[in-house]
Image: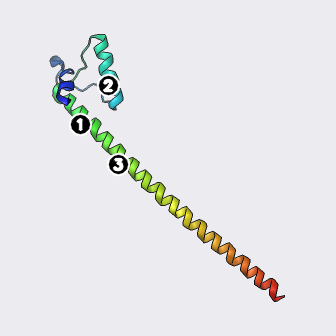
């Protein structure tokens, strides 16, 4: 599929130039707009392959970033839970101490 998609993006007289780099949706929209206008995007087969590789790399990096953020959120939630438990234990200890002092009077 990559090679057939890339072959529709060839305009030999402009070989060696990449004019646009998009995310996957923007890339698809650009190709569709060019085809509707009867103009080929200014890309060689190699450049189109390179662009598709960049898009896949960006998707992979985005998935990695999302995973890291999910891990961070999980760790932050656990930290909040632990700190809440520590605060509860502290206030219970203060209350018990207050009750003991009140009983001693």
Q: Is residue 88 above or below residue 9?
A: below
Residues at badges 2 and 3 in contact (C-beta under 8 Å)?
Answer: no
- 28 relative position to 72: left or right: left
**Residue 36 position within the rendered picture, expressed as x and y whole percent measured from the top left:** 31, 12
Q: Earlier in the sequence, mark 2 or mark 3?
A: 2
Image quadrant where one finds the C terminus: bottom right
Q: 10 Å neighbourhood of mark 3: few (<14), some, or many (≥20)?
A: few
Label 2 sits on a secondary structure element that is helix
Front residue of 94/12: it is 94
Residue at the (26%, 37%) spot, across then down: 54
Q: Is residue 50 above or below residue 91?
A: above
Front residue of 42/61: it is 61
Q: Earlier in the sequence, mark 3 or mark 1?
A: 1
Residue at the (27%, 24%) spot, across then down: 19
Residues at badges 1 and 2 in contact (C-beta under 8 Å)?
Answer: no
Disc 3 designates what residue?
A: 64
Label 3 sits on a secondary structure element that is helix
Q: Earlier in the sequence, mark 1 or mark 2?
A: 2
Q: Which mark is residue 53?
A: 1
Q: Which mark is residue 28?
A: 2
Q: Is residue 103 above or below residue 31?
A: below
Q: CA distance from mark 2 to mark 3?
A: 23 Å
Indicate the quadrant where residue 12 lies. top left
Q: CA distance from mark 3 to mark 1?
A: 16 Å
Front residue of 100/15: it is 100
Q: CA distance from mark 1 to mark 2?
A: 14 Å
**Residue 17 position within the rendered picture, expressed as x and y whole percent measured from the top left:** 21, 25
Residues at badges 3 and 1 in contact (C-beta under 8 Å)?
Answer: no
**Residue 13 position within the rendered picture, expressed as x and y whole percent measured from the top left:** 16, 17
Residue at the (48%, 55%) spot, across then down: 73
């Amino acid at each position: 599929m990559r090679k057939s998609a890339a072959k529709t993006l060839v305009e030999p007289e402009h070989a060696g130039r990449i004019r646009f780099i998009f995310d996957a949706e923007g890339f698809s929209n650009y190709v569709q707009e060019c085809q509707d206008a009867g103009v080929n995007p200014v890309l060689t087969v190699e450049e189109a392959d390179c662009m598709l590789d960049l898009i896949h790399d960006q998707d992979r990096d985005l998935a990695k970033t999302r995973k890291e953020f999910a891990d961070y959120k999980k760790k932050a939630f656990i930290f909040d839970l632990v700190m809440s438990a520590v605060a509860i234990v502290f206030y219970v200890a203060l209350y018990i101490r207050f009750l003991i002092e009140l009983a001693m009077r």
